[in-house]
């Protein structure tokens, strides 16, 4: 395929011409087309769809050479793509990974280098393979053992591309799996670096019934640590939640052993729970972002009194209120209860730069996690962020001027072309992207508080033009607006039905 060197204006003009050509195609009527004409047009569109990613890869690779994510106003290129194009981070990761493997490269000295997978890139540029073929080839090449030399790798890639041109993704994957098996029929030799690469513990999405699936691949050392713990706490009769007085230390009685009808998997689950509780109650886990390592749960007074409803932890786990009440008997847990209150006791004004432990508890309960739209970092991994003005620029450390933000997002806020934040009238943190990422997307993060999407739209109360300013000023001073302005309107009256609830009362965070 011939690639012509073009200026930036030429590239934009060519893309606009492609856009205009598509508009012309989209405006064509197909009612009078024959079967063969329709198939021919669909074949051409399919080929064009297969070729377009190769152009996107080259442009994306060039953009990464021209700028940094920080210059674009983001933490990473994955965030740049996710914010600007409103795609998921997993899709952004896929596009960046394919661009790194299929786009031309540039050496440190400046000369141009071929793509990491040149045969795959060429086939895609000619529309001979589709996105599914590309994914199979890319993953297969990444799985090749380290002892395979460069010439063999290139030959394997060419063979895979040749197979992909005439077959579907399923046949290609079967052929690729057979190639990997023949290369290393005995499996990889045990290697410390390979074991370290594969280690991991993954928590999956919480299910509708409240259960959480966890998968793990443990190193020999990690499993050796848990073996004696399971031998002790997962033994028959130990840590049995069905016992009126469960045995958590010493040796269970014979009656407790005989009455233990749990499976081994259930006993190991209960052992994990017991070991975690012992670690939390020991007080030896240090601090996490200014608080002792502990469980923080938010709920409402109405749910506690009725013993119905849910509580939500600082990590986003939903718990039935009955389990919340049971956990209240264990040490080092915090329960943030929302009800009618003023929250004035949490206003530190200029006394301290960092949020107090009581403020952090209520921030975790109110925001649930990083408030930047699209950020999935939970409350346990966040810092207290001065929303309206940084502390160094006169900002106050008040509960209604603070919000949760993970470390990278907290540092991304500035007034020099980066992100900016403000607190709206509902005490929700709004984030405004820098100009290069601003496409009119949502300013709020609903990932940690999805119930906010369910609230009905507000209807403004009718009022005359003459008394608007007087009412606003009066309401602002009645609510004790610490900023002394009416930029965001008056603070609403405390209402336990509001999403997130009002600010907490004195001594209500235990």
Image (spheres, rainbow, N blue to C red):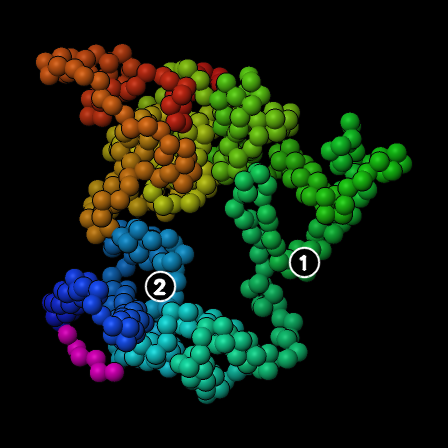
For the point 28% across and 54% down, the residue is 85
Quarter of the rendering occupied by the N terminus: bottom left
For the point 50% across and 76% down, the residue is 171
Give yes or no for residue 85 being in the magenta stretch: no
104 or 161, which is in the foreground?
161
Taking 111 as reference, is 219 left or right?
Answer: right
Locate residue 477: give its quadrant. top left
Locate residue 50: give its quadrant. bottom left
Residue pointed to by mark 1 = 221
Locate residue 257, reporting x and y percent: 85, 38
Helix, strand or loop status at disc 2: helix
For the point 36% across and 58% down, the residue is 92
Q: CA distance from mark 2 to mark 1?
A: 36 Å
Helix, strand or loop status at disc 1: helix
Locate residue 282, reporting x and y percent: 65, 34
Is residue 112 something one can see in this rendering?
yes
For discs 2 and 1, the disc positioned in front in the rendered view: 2
Residue pointed to by mark 2 = 95
Give yes or no for residue 4 being in the magenta stretch: yes
Write down the region rendered in magenta.
Answer: 1-6
Taking 39 as reference, is 14 left or right?
Answer: left
Locate residue 184, reporting x and y percent: 61, 80
Specify the principal SS of the magenta part.
loop
- Compared with residue 327, is residue 159 higher up or lower down, i.e. above or below? below
For the point 21% across and 80% down, the residue is 3
Is residue 146 something one can see in this rendering?
no
Taking 338 as reference, is 423 left or right?
Answer: left
Around disc 1, counting alpha carbons within 10 Å, would you say few (fewer than 14), some (14 to 19), or many (20 or more)? few
**N-terminal of the two: label 2 or label 1?**
2
Residue 106 is tagged as none
Taking 68 as reference, is 157 left or right?
Answer: right
Locate residue 204, reporting x and y percent: 54, 49
């Amino acid at each position: 395929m011939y690639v012509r060197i073009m200026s930036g204006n030429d590239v934009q003009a060519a893309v606009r011409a492609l856009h205009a050509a598509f508009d012309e195609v989209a405006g064509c009527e197909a009612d009078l087309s024959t079967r063969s004409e329709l198939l021919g047009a669909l074949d051409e569109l399919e080929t064009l769809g297969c070729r377009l990613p190769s152009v996107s890869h080259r442009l994306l690779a060039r953009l990464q050479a021209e700028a940094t994510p920080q210059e674009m106003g983001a933490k990473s290129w994955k965030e740049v793509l996710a914010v600007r194009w409103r795609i998921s981070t997993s899709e952004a990761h896929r596009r960046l990974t394919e661009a790194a493997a299929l786009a031309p490269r540039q050496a440190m000295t400046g000369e141009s280098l071929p793509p990491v997978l040149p045969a795959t890139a060429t086939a895609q540029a000619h529309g001979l393979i589709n996105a599914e073929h590309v994914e199979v080839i890319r993953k297969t090449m990444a799985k090749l053992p380290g002892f395979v030399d460069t010439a063999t790798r290139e030959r394997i890639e060419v063979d895979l591309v040749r197979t992909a041109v005439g077959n579907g993704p399923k046949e290609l994957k079967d052929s690729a799996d057979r190639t990997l098996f023949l290369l290393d029929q005995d499996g990889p030799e045990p290697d410390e670096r390979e074991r370290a690469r594969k280690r991991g513990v993954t928590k999956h999405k919480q299910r509708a019934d409240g259960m959480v699936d966890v998968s793990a691949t443990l190193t020999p050392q990690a499993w050796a640590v848990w073996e004696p713990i399971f031998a002790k706490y997962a033994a028959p009769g130990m840590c049995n939640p069905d016992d009126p007085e469960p045995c958590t230390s010493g040796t269970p009685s014979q009656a407790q052993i005989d009455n233990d009808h749990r499976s081994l998997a259930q006993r190991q689950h209960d052992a994990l729970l017991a070991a975690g509780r012992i670690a939390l109650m020991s007080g030896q886990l240090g601090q996490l972002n200014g608080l002792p390592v502990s469980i923080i749960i938010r709920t409402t007074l109405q749910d506690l009194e009725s013993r119905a409803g849910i509580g939500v932890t600082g990590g986003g786990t939903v718990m039935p209120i009955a389990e919340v009440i049971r956990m209240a008997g264990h040490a080092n847990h915090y329960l943030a209860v929302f009800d009618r209150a003023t929250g004035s006791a949490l206003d530190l004004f200029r006394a301290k730069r960092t949020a107090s432990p009581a403020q952090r508890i209520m921030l975790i309960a109110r925001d649930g996690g990083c408030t930047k739209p699209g950020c999935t970092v939970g409350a346990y991994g966040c810092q207290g962020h001065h929303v309206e003005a940084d502390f160094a620029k006169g900002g106050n450390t008040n509960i209604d001027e603070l919000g949760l933000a993970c470390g990278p997002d907290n540092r991304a806020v500035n007034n020099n072309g980066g992100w900016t934040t403000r607190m709206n009238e509902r005490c929700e943190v709004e984030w405004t992207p820098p100009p290069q990422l601003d496409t009119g997307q949502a300013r709020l993060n609903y990932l940690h508080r999805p119930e906010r999407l369910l609230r009905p739209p507000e209807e403004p109360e009718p009022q005359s033009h003459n008394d608007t300013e007087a009412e606003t000023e009066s309401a602002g001073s009645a609510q004790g607006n610490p900023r002394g302005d009416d930029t965001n309107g008056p603070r609403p009256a405390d209402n336990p039905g509001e999403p997130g609830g009002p600010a907490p009362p004195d001594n209500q965070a235990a």
